[in-house]
Image (cartoon, helix red, strand yellow):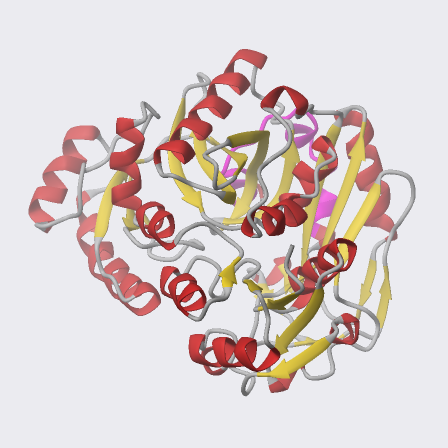
C-alpha cells in the first residue's frame, strides 16, 4: 500500500479522498490554489502545498505544478478525483514518468475511451450497441447534412474529445445543423484542443443509465450495477438513483454485462462508468465511458456496501480484487441530489458568495458529502456544487420520503441553491412514478 498520496483536486472530492486514505493508513498531501487557502478541509490533510493563483488554468490544471508538488512532498501516488486533470492521459503519463502512480486507468485506456469515435468502434467489436452515428468524424458538412436527412431529425452534434456537456448541439433541421457545426467546432477546439465532431441520432424520450465498473491489473472487471441519471439540465446531472426504476431484471443484467465487455475490451482497470441511453422500448445504446470516479459514486456505495474510492486506491497499489461478481449484491434504493450554488429561477445562474447559515440534514440512512460550512466562500472560479445529499432505504417510496424530509431540513443562506427545485422534483407526479427522461427537467421547469 502507498505511504503518501497527493490529492490533485479540491472541495468535496478532496475531502472524500482524505477520509478514504486515513482509513487505509495513507498520509495525504493536498494541493490548493491561493483562493482556496482557507478551505477547512485542508486542515485534515497531513500536508498542503500551494500550486498557484485562483484560476484553475494557473493551478489545478497545471500538470507541471502538480508534479512538482508531488516530487517535493515525496509521494507514492496521485489521486486526481473528478474534473480538472482526472481524464487527462498526458497527466497520467507525467505521473508515471516521474515514478509516481496515477490512481486511475492506463493512459492508453484513457486515450482510447476518451476519444468518443474510437470508443464507438471498440463498442462495435465488443458487441455493445451504439446509437446510430456517422461511423467516423465529419469530413464534409454537406455529407453530414445528407446523413442527418437519411436517419431523420433531430440529430446531435458531439465533440470526439468531449465531456461535461461541452461541444454538444441538438439540431432539428438542416439550417440549425449547418449553423451549429461551426459553433460546436469552436467550442470543442477551445475546450479540448480538438475540433473533431460526429453526429448521432437523437433517441427521443430516453433515460440516461450508467453502469459502475471496477477492474484490476490482473484483468478482472466487475460491475456494481447501474444508476439512473435522467434528471439533468444542459447535460449536467441533478439527481441520480439506483436501481433504475424502469429496467427489468433481464435488461439490468444485459446492460451490466455489456458494460463489463466494453471495459475488458479496453484493457481497463480502476473505477470507471459506462453510460448508456435507454429508449422507451427498453433498448440500450452506448453513450460514452468516463475513465474516473463519478460525482454520483456514493449512490453505488450505498446499495453495494463497497467503498469505491478505497478500491480505486487499492487497485492502483497493485491489489487484485478479492471478490467475484456473485459477491456484489444490490440492497435497497439509494438516491443522490446535487446541491449547487445556482438560482434555478434565473436559468441556473451561478450564485457565488459567503455562506452565513449552513444546516445539513441527518438521520438513519442519510449521508451528506460536503466541504461546505457556515463561513465558507463559494468561489465563482470553480464548479458550483457545494454538497451531495444521499439517502438509502429499503424501497423507492421510502427513499423518496426520506429525501423529501432531508430537503426540507437542508438550509443554506443567503446564497441561492438548487434545493427549492429539488423539492419540486421530489413532489412531481411523474418523478414519483419513475416516469422521467433526460428532457424532463427542461420541459417541466
Q: Where is the N terminus found, in terms of image quarters?
A: bottom right
Percent position of residue 442, x then y:
52, 45
User: Residue 180 lies in what quarter of the image?
Assistant: bottom left
User: Residue 13 lies in what quarter of the image?
Assistant: bottom right
Q: Is residue 42 above or below residue 211?
A: below
Percent position of residue 105, x then y:
45, 49
Front position in the image: 96 or 255: 96
* Residue visible at 58% across and 66% down in the picture: 76
Q: Among all residues in the image, which is located at the extreme right?
A: 363
Tally the marks: 0
Q: Is residue 245 above or below residue 287?
A: above
Front position in the image: 270 or 360: 270
Relative placement, left or right, of 337 versus 93 is right
Q: Is residue 172 visible?
A: no
Relative placement, left or right, of 244 versus 95 is right
Percent position of residue 383, x then y:
57, 66
- On whether residue 427 falls in the magenta region, the answer is yes
Percent position of residue 136, x then y:
17, 42
Q: Is residue 69 visible?
A: yes
Q: Is residue 85 above or below residue 282?
A: below
Q: Among all residues in the image, which is located at the extreme top?
A: 250
Q: Which residues are magenta?
A: 421-443
Front position in the image: 319 or 222: 319
Q: Is residue 146 above or below residue 414?
A: above
- On whether residue 61 falls in the magenta region, the answer is no
* Residue visible at 79% across and 71% down in the picture: 44
Amino acid at each position: 500500500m502507498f505511504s503518501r498520496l497527493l490529492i490533485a483536486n479540491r472541495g468535496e472530492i478532496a475531502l472524500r479522498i482524505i477520509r478514504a486514505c486515513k482509513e487505509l493508513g495513507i498520509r495525504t498531501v493536498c494541493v490548493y490554489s491561493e483562493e482556496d487557502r482557507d478551505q477547512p478541509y485542508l486542515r485534515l490533510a497531513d500536508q498542503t502545498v500551494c500550486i498557484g493563483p485562483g484560476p484553475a488554468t494557473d493551478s489545478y490544471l497545471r500538470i507541471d505544478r502538480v508534479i512538482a508538488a508531488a516530487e517535493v512532498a515525496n509521494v507514492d501516488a496521485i489521486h486526481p478525483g473528478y474534473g480538472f486533470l482526472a481524464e487527462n492521459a498526458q497527466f497520467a503519463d507525467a505521473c508515471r514518468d516521474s515514478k509516481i502512480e496515477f490512481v486511475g486507468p492506463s493512459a492508453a485506456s484513457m486515450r482510447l475511451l476518451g476519444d468518443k469515435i474510437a470508443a464507438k468502434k471498440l463498442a462495435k467489436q465488443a458487441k455493445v450497441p451504439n446509437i446510430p452515428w456517422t461511423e467516423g468524424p465529419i469530413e464534409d458538412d454537406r455529407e453530414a447534412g445528407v446523413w442527418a436527412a437519411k436517419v431523420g431529425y433531430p440529430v446531435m452534434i458531439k465533440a470526439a474529445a468531449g465531456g461535461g456537456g461541452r461541444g454538444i448541439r441538438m439540431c432539428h433541421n438542416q439550417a440549425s445543423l449547418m449553423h451549429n457545426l461551426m459553433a460546436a467546432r469552436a467550442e470543442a477546439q477551445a475546450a479540448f484542443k480538438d475540433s473533431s465532431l460526429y453526429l448521432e441520432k437523437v433517441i427521443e424520450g430516453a433515460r440516461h443509465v450508467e453502469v459502475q465498473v471496477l477492474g484490476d491489473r490482473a484483468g478482472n472487471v466487475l460491475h456494481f450495477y447501474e444508476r439512473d441519471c435522467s434528471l439533468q439540465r444542459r447535460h449536467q446531472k441533478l439527481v441520480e438513483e439506483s436501481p433504475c426504476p424502469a429496467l427489468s431484471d433481464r435488461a439490468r443484467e444485459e446492460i451490466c454485462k455489456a458494460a463489463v465487455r466494453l471495459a475488458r475490451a479496453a484493457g481497463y482497470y480502476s473505477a470507471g462508468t459506462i453510460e448508456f441511453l435507454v429508449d422507451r422500448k427498453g433498448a440500450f445504446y452506448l453513450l460514452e465511458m468516463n475513465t474516473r470516479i463519478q460525482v454520483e459514486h456514493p449512490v453505488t456505495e450505498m446499495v453495494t456496501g463497497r467503498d469505491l474510492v478505497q478500491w480505486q486506491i487499492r487497485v492502483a497499489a497493485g491489489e487484485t480484487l478479492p471478490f467475484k461478481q456473485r459477491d456484489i449484491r444490490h440492497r435497497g434504493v439509494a438516491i443522490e441530489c446535487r446541491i449547487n450554488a445556482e438560482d434555478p429561477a434565473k436559468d441556473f445562474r451561478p450564485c457565488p458568495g459567503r455562506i452565513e447559515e449552513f444546516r445539513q440534514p441527518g438521520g438513519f440512512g442519510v449521508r451528506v458529502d460536503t466541504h461546505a460550512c457556515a463561513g465558507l466562500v463559494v468561489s465563482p472560479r470553480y464548479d458550483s456544487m457545494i454538497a451531495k445529499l444521499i439517502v438509502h432505504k429499503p424501497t423507492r417510496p421510502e427513499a423518496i420520503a426520506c429525501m423529501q424530509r432531508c430537503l426540507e431540513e437542508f438550509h443554506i443562506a443567503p446564497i441561492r441553491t438548487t434545493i427549492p427545485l429539488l423539492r419540486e422534483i421530489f413532489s412531481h407526479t411523474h418523478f414519483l412514478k419513475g416516469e422521467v427522461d433526460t428532457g424532463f427537467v427542461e420541459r417541466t421547469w
